[in-house]
Amino acid sequence: MIDVRSITKRYGDKVAVDGLSFELPAGVVTGFLGPNGSGKSTTMRVIMGLDRPDEGSATIDGRPYAALSQPLREVGALLEAKAIHPGRSAFNHLWFLAQTNDIPRRRVNEVIDLVGLSDVAHQRVGKFSLGMGQRLGIAAALLGDPHTLLFDEPINGLDPEGILWVRTLLRGLASEGRTVFVSSHLMGEMALTADRLVVIGRGRLISTGSVADFITDNAGQYVTVRTPRPDELEGLLRAAGGRVVREADGSLAVSDLSAEVVGRTAGEAGIYLYELSPQLASLEDAFMEMTRTSVEYHGHDLADRTNDPVPTPGK
């Protein structure tokens, strides 16, 4: 289990992490979400003992990382896939790490085969693609067969087959009773991979709990409606207290009204419906709604938007 207790980390006048606390249980994949600059990488570095917090503590099974006698056998991490000497081969890089923790040579071959790098094991890693580098970083994290694993953006540079492989790998590791902590900016993939979430913004905890509860609490449900008279129905639904977004395909995304109320409103006005279907908002919808006041770097649209800021699909 990873236990983060009231950690604060400053870089000069910049507060990267601000009184952050959470626990990560074993046996599940916990996703780590937050906008750019929210403190995710700093938090992971503090857990791994690479940065010392100004306040608070981070422990792994009750001990700080620096107190672990053979850390690769207890904790594996992929924080920066390119942190490898480019002149070494994949095998030599892993064999060097293995010798520091008394890990047998056969384990090097096992993880190379596991991540699919057997054919390039003796090539210099400086010639590796981004995806191959990610696979090598995952191999290094798995080298000591650790109980606790941290991955910072592990699917960067991977093709669809590689992304599916990582998803299956992480869920398999968690099913073995390991603690798995993974950050990603790809909300769709996180929704498929993670069981729980830790969400932060501006270095502070925003939410922690199951993925399903996070979506329900922060985006809820909406209703997709298709009709030959969208303008008229939109006006009626707004008058009934609904919030409406016109989708690119002409359908209406309606929140704050149930499907029953939408159907009755349309029926009383004699408006035919081609579709009336309740939808559960996505993890991306919930994340955008929950973190919109915690985003440090904002972009700007090319044109002003006039739709209501509904925390449901409308893209």
Image: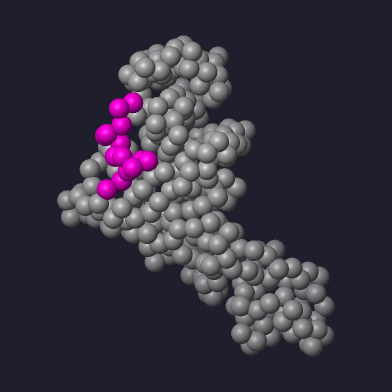
Q: Is the residue 223 above or below the residue 2 in the image? A: below
Foreground pick, 238 / 70: 70
Q: Residue at x 41, y 43 (%)?
A: 1
Q: Residue at x 65, y 79 (%)?
A: 257
Q: Which residues are magenta?
A: 57-70
Q: Is the residue 245 above or below the residue 172 in the image? A: below
Q: Is the residue 48 above or below the residue 130 in the image? A: below
Q: Residue at x 63, y 69 (%)?
A: 221
**Where is residue 232 shown, x and y percent of the image?**
72, 83
**Where is residue 51 shown, x and y percent of the image?**
25, 41
Which of the 4 image quadrants contains residue 52?
Answer: top left
Q: Is the residue 165 above or below the residue 5 in the image? A: above
Residue at the far front: name it. 62
Residue at the far left: name it. 12
Query: Colour scheme of this structure image?
Result: one colour
Q: Is residue 277 rendered to the left or right of residue 24?
A: right
Quarter of the image where the C terminus is located: bottom right
Q: Is residue 298 rendered to the left or right of residue 10?
A: right
Residue 10 shown in magenta: no
Foreground pick, 296 / 79: 79
**Where is residue 23 shown, x and y percent of the image?**
40, 51
Q: Residue at x 78, y 69 (%)?
A: 275
Number of marks in picture: 0
Foreground pick, 179 / 181: 179
Query: Is any part of residue 17 visible from this angle?
Result: no
**Where is residue 124 shown, x and y percent of the image?**
42, 15
Query: Is any part of residue 174 visible from this angle?
Result: yes
Q: Is residue 235 rendered to the left or right of residue 62?
A: right
